[in-house]
Amino acid sequence: MVVTAIEPQKRDPSRYNIFIDGEYAFALPMQDILYFKLKEGQEAAEETIEFIRKNLIYIKAQDTALHFIGYKMRTVQEIRRKLAEKEFAEETIEEVIAFLEKYGYADDREYCRKYIREKLRMKPKSGYALKIELRQRGISPRIIDEVMGETEMDEAGDAFRWLEKKSRGQWPPENEKKKKQLYDFLLRKGYSYDIIGEAFRQMEEAYGGED
């Protein structure tokens, strides 16, 4: 193994990227570089490199990930992105992800369940909108569909409650412009035409008046 380059990081100049045999291996502070006698163009013992990876780099990556998820649940993709930003090697990132998943620190299914429950409790959205948001967070479509399939949702009821809130109980809408504004509002929430139509029908039943 040959140390082919030692370059200061752009994000943290106090740490240096180490390249082994032309490929990025890990980053170290200068005191560790000096301690392990790593020099550009010189051989490095395989045992030394493995020790650094397993006892310094991996532990630091693990600590970074645990701190990142310590105050807020994260998706696997969000954790992976965070570690990549810290310039950990892909091999190290995958090892940390495997550890987190094994011990339940990273669980995209549970993330989905909690995310959906919280959204439906605080600010209801359509199933379509929730799917888009979860995919943006890196959850696989398969997991999203499985979790959505086990979740009881009342989209028409949620859309009805949005209409109640936005119309302030004044029904029917005073004119076509106001009606279109309410309709477009629900469309932006991701509700389908059928769901919106059902919500308007429920408003008619609840508050009377003609459309």
Image (spheres, rainbow, N blue to C red):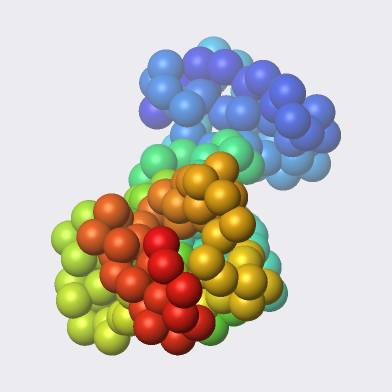
Observer able to see residue 23: yes
Q: Is residue 15 above or below residue 78?
A: above
x, y percentage for residue 63?
A: 62, 66
Give the left or right position of residue 178, taking residue 34 as reference.
left
Between 141 and 64, the residue placed more toward the observer is: 141
Observer able to see residue 105: no
Give the left or right position of residue 114, taking residue 102 as reference.
right
Give the left or right position of residue 6, taking residue 155 as reference.
right
x, y percentage for residue 180?
A: 49, 46
Between 90 and 121, the residue placed more toward the observer is: 121
Q: Is residue 57 above or below residue 65?
A: above
Q: Residue at x 57, y 28 (%)?
A: 18
x, y percentage for residue 171?
A: 56, 71
Q: Residue at x 42, y 67 (%)?
A: 210
x, y percentage for residue 44?
A: 49, 32
Q: Is residue 163 above or below residue 8?
A: below
Q: Residue at x 60, y 39 (%)?
A: 85
Question: Quadrant location of the C terminus?
Answer: bottom left
Q: Residue at x 60, y 57 (%)?
A: 174
Give the left or right position of residue 146, taking residue 28 as reference.
left
Q: Is residue 148 above or below residue 89?
A: below
